Amino acid sequence: MSVFAGLVEHLADLLQPLFHASAAAAAIVLCTALVRLLVHPLSRAAARGQRARAALQPRIAELRKKHGKDQQALQKAVLELHAEERVSPLSGFLPVLLQLPAFFVLYHLFSSPTIGGHGNGLLSHDLLGAPLGGRWADSLGDGVGSAGSLVYLGLFAVVAAVATFTFLRTRRMAAGAVVSGGEGEQVPGMGAVTKVMPYLSYFTLVTVAVVPLAAALYVVTSTAWSAVERAVLYR
């Protein structure tokens, strides 16, 4: 964690002439972009995997007709088909899982009063007057018109806009799949997950509300990046 803290502080020093007191916040956004760039090859692979899974839909439909209501046999046949074609039904989750360590590091970094036995100097940084180690509940205590409340209002607006964009786009893609004959679960048992996933973007609002502002910046930046990335890769 101290290594990551040193990276944030170094980037903040470099960005200070441009962003002044909000340089650490800008450094967090930049670190998030770097993490997403590192994960991008996996995101591209996940997009290729989704196209490959879509191409298997006619064969999966045949297996569904063949096995009828025998869900166990259907599941086994579908998994064998994915293995035969070297297509992972869960490849889309890997980019998300690999981002979690960076999120948890940021969470602990701005929740710990000390780092390596020394005072955590990062807690003294802010974004437009809102401390990076503070939370939404703290800003409400300072008043609705406080700097912290206004910063969080802006973050909530961004998250809501991105979540709505993601939700509508996911629904359009699902409708397009049905029209093209791609209805049905690609893997038996994944249908419930597929139905819930469009709504998960709105859960980001809860995350932003309860984590330190620094971690909230990571979440907002990463969520916006994901929306743009998916729009490009899955167009």
Image: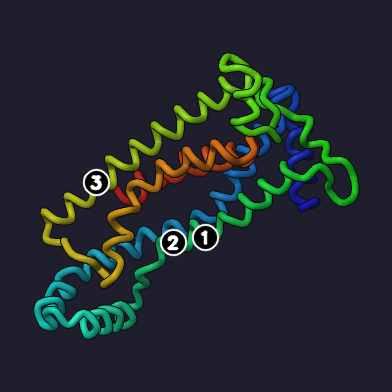
Residue found at x 17% / y 50%? 175
Query: Could you tell me which secondary element the residue under label 2 belongs to?
Result: helix
Is residue 206 rendered to the left or right of residue 127? left
Residue found at x 56% / y 17%? 144
Residue found at x 45% / y 27%? 157
Q: Which residue is mark 1?
A: 97
N-term-proximal mark, 1 vs 3: 1
* Relative image position of residue 119 (x, y in whole percent): 87, 41
Mark 1, other Cα within 10 Å: few <14 / some 14–19 / many ≥20: few
The residue most toward the right is 117
Query: Could you tell me which secondary element the residue under label 3 belongs to?
Result: helix
User: Residue 125 occupies which quadrant of the picture?
Assistant: top right
Is residue 15 rendered to the left or right of residue 96? right
Check if mark 1's residue and mark 3's residue have beta carbons within 8 Å: no
Distance between the alpha carbons at the discs numbered 1 and 2:
6 Å
Residue 74, relative to residue 152: is it above or below? below
Q: Which residue is mark 3?
A: 171
Q: Tag 1: residue type?
A: Leu
* Relative image position of residue 201 (x, y in whole percent): 40, 44
Check if mark 1's residue and mark 2's residue have beta carbons within 8 Å: yes
Query: Could you tell me which secondary element the residue under label 1 belongs to?
Result: helix
Q: Which residue is mark 2?
A: 93
Residue found at x 87% / y 51%? 116
Total numbered circles: 3
Q: Tag 3: residue type?
A: Arg
